[in-house]
Image (spheres, rainbow, N blue to C red):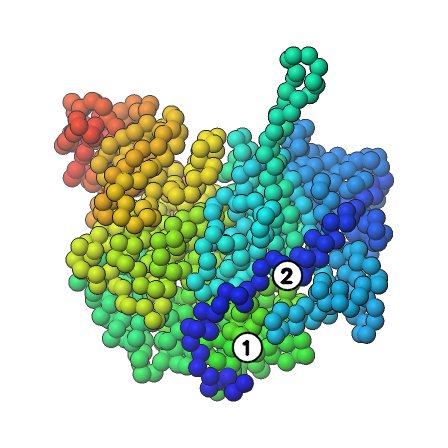
Amino acid sequence: MATAEKEEISVEDEAVAKTIFKDCGKIAFYRRQKQQLSENTTYWASLGSVDTEQDSTRFQIISEATKIPLVAEVSGIEKDIFRLKINEETPLKTRLVCSGDTGSLILTDRKGDLKCRISANPFKIDLLSKNEAMISINSLGKLYFEHLQVPHKHRATKGNGQNTPADTSQEDQEDLGLWEEKYGKFVDVKANGPSSVGLDFSLHGFEHLYGIPQHAESHQLKNTKDGDAYRLYNLDVYGYQVYDKMGIYGSVPYLLAHKQGRTVGIFWLNASETLVEINTEPAVEYTLTQMGPAAAKQKARCRTDVHWMSESGIIDVFLLTGPTPADVFKQYSYITGTQAMPPLFSLGYHQCRWNYEDEQDVKAVDAGFDEHDIPYDVMWLDIEHTEDKKYFTWDKKRFANPKRMQELLRSKKRKLVVISDPHIKVDPEYTIYAQAKEQGFFVKNPEGGDFEGICWPGLSSYLDFTNPKVREWYSSLFAFPVYQGSTDILFIWNDMNEPSVFRGPELTMQKNAVHYGNWEHRELHNIYGFYQQMATAEGLIQRSKGKERPFVLSRSFFAGSQKYGAVWTGDNTAEWSYLKISIPMLLTLSVSGISFCGADVGGFIGNPEEELLVRWYQAAAYQPFFRGHATMNTKRREPWLFGEEYTQLIREAIRERYTLLPYLYSLFYQVHVSSQPVMRPLWVEFPDDLETFSVEDEYMLGSALLVHPVTEPQTASTDVFLPGPNEVWYNSKTFAYWKGGCTVKIPVTLDTIPVFQRGGSVVPIKTAVGKSTGWMADSPYGLRVALSTQGSAVGELYLDDGHSFQYLHQDQFLHRKFLFCSSVLTNRCANEKGHYPTKCVVEQILVLGLRKKPSSVTTHSSDGKVQPAAFTYCAKTSTLSLEKLSLSIGDDWEVHVS
């Protein structure tokens, strides 16, 4: 190979044939577990004596075949969470307490509602609610644990530490990938032999499962009995295939199961390559007795079996027992953290391209938004803004004065996001590389030297973000004196952090590369990008001395990434199928803890036709993260380049996003403090409505808005399911209303975005849209009040400065609650702790579903002042409209309709 620095690196290095990625049959630990488990491996639990310490219980489980013991620990955590850990035996001793008999052991939570029954032979754990099994562990006997071994060269192996015979042939060893695993030209050498783990879970009465992102797949998880398992392995898959279970950019090993009356979760805490098999056994009727003409029949509950397999690590699993979807979301965030409260600007529209050419290009695009009256908040720069792909630098010709460019954006109250990838160009003259090299901050190869691979700069080394000192150093690079040319309106995009290694195995890092603490890369592959986003977010906080909220977008992610920023669905394609799949992909991320998510508008790869581009803007305007992005070999696609008809349609979609920002920002506060997703599948809001359990072409934005994007070309009408037989739904544009619990056919034209407001809700909006969120801070509010069948409605507004941590440290916020009941709309404080000065007023109120024209409307202020309010009433649509009000958003007041 020629010296890598001189090689031409292009998009083709990413856009490789899909054949370089493995299917399950090519993954050795999967083959081993499938082969060995077919031989009915059995473990039994030694329950004659157990070790008990505080809230945990430890006992041995022993393999019948090898007699090698493992140590299991069951612990109860707060908030109805159970944890099971299984590891190799350790010499630590705890207090010995005799409990139970040798057949079974029952642990009960403090309330007594939940029980954990441990059976000895064969080893099995049942989690019971009201004495009925919810989740069974190892009921199929698929517990699998490969023990680490001391390497001995040129010897007959004792197998894989599980059940492989001692006389395993060399050919079988290679096929099973025990000590070496070959794939193409790559050989993965395993210093301590195979180390995979696995365990099965049976979910009783459940047949609807969700979660385990990231896959370009349906929201409801599918049976894998006749195909590949779901793979969790972070990979750079340029133009990934839709409806495919292969792993792509991020991994969250967390699965939810839902049925009427109960939601549960399984969080498999393992950052190595993981495979998940799912098999649902439907409910069946069977006859209890054949005697007599009236044979008794009974229906057996359906059951779904989930089999987790990981290449390395220990078994460490959390069982979240709900019982409601909201409870499970809280339980999961209790373990992994809640979504970070984003700065307000980041909920606006983002304009990105690989690449905007230079400062003049940035200036022209920025001016184009103003010229065409289209709001936007953030300009983005990809890798070409740097000098020779050296991050934290600027191309001296194209971006000679980056501060001047940022001051232009600042004058428009806009921001800049630039890219910073984890690979560092091998160049002793490059300060970042030299410092990291000197301090030993790169991932190592097995021989102890710095790992080197090919990425955008050519030959690169990779920062070891698993090392706290590396993260601390990396965070310091964002300080203004260090990052020359940066200002406080510059924020960061972490890309290629799976990590992507061109010409590496499956375009990523070799598994036997070595990290801090002597951990092999195989142990922590899926958490690598998580640590980069963590360090980046911390760096942005530190540069402001802890005052300002960061914004960091990361392509790779893991459980808990929500604490540090946003993610997106990666390198999608400009095709209708990618628009359609983006909805279930985002719903899956949302129920898996990561609410701040989105898909690139129009598709990163290829050139979208005008209709597709418009429909994508319309869909994305109602999704959490809203960015247009395109790769370098595509045509320019700023919103005004397709003719005035399409410019107007895109403008309307983006402006509607800005109108809804008060509602959207309030939803982010809700997910930040109480873990309820911003974008919700219907089953979350209607957990007892069976018809919602498989819906993935529409969703709830919060609890108030139902969005049904048009995802098919040349659509004249679309079928919209409106859930809830006791609900009423209002078309957000025409104000037409329907009773819930039915599917309605909605005529659509290219300017139609099917959005429905739920009766019983109040949605706060902005009545005027500015050039960016910064121009809208003091603009008036409106309230869209949609009455329920009982004539009531409720909603909230959260307000703070939109950028700092003062809401957290100094209670600088307003949290207001709106209630319409008995013909009176009230504005009251929802949290007395919060105080925030604001000039904003409510100037417009729209009440939907008011069946009778009122005779008068009056406003009542907290000081007792009563004033008549002018109003208009439309009998055709049953709407009451109040205009030109001046009701302070931060004060208590009432509006009486009589």
As helix, strand or loop, the secondary structure at mark 2 comes to: loop
As helix, strand or loop, the secondary structure at mark 1 comes to: strand
- Give coordinates of residue 368: x percent, y percent: 20, 65
> How many neighbours does mark 1 have within 10 angstroms: few (below 14), some (14-19), or many (20 or more)?
many
Residue 418 quadrant: bottom left
Q: Is residue 350 visible?
A: no
Q: Is residue 324 visible?
A: yes
Q: In the figure, 665 relative to 687: above or below? A: below
Residue pictured at 49% horizontal, 75% vertical: 455
> How many neighbours does mark 2 have within 10 angstroms: few (below 14), some (14-19), or many (20 or more)?
some
> Residue 489: which disc?
none
Query: Residue beneath label 1, please?
Result: 453
- Give coordinates of residue 301: x percent, y percent: 61, 30
Closer to us: 636 or 268: 636
Q: Total number of numbered labels?
A: 2
> Would you say the residues marked 1 and 2 are in contact, meaning their CB atoms lie under 8 Å apart?
no
Closer to us: 200 or 514: 200
Is residue 324 found left or right of 568 in the rendered image?
Answer: right
Closer to us: 526 or 695: 695
Q: Say which quadrant the C terminus sits in.
A: top left
Is residue 348 found left or right of 130 in the rendered image?
Answer: left
- Give coordinates of residue 804: x percent, y percent: 39, 57
Q: In the figure, 244 relative to 681: above or below? A: below
Residue pictured at 30% horizontal, 29% vertical: 738
Residue pictured at 42% horizontal, 76% vertical: 10
Q: Say which quadrant the N terminus sits in.
A: bottom right
State which tag comes first along the sequence, 1 or 2.
Answer: 2
Give the amino acid type for the residue marked by disc 2 in the picture. Ile
Give the amino acid type for the residue marked by disc 1 in the picture. Gly
Q: In the figure, 691 relative to 150: above or below? A: above
Query: Residue beneath label 2, please?
Result: 27
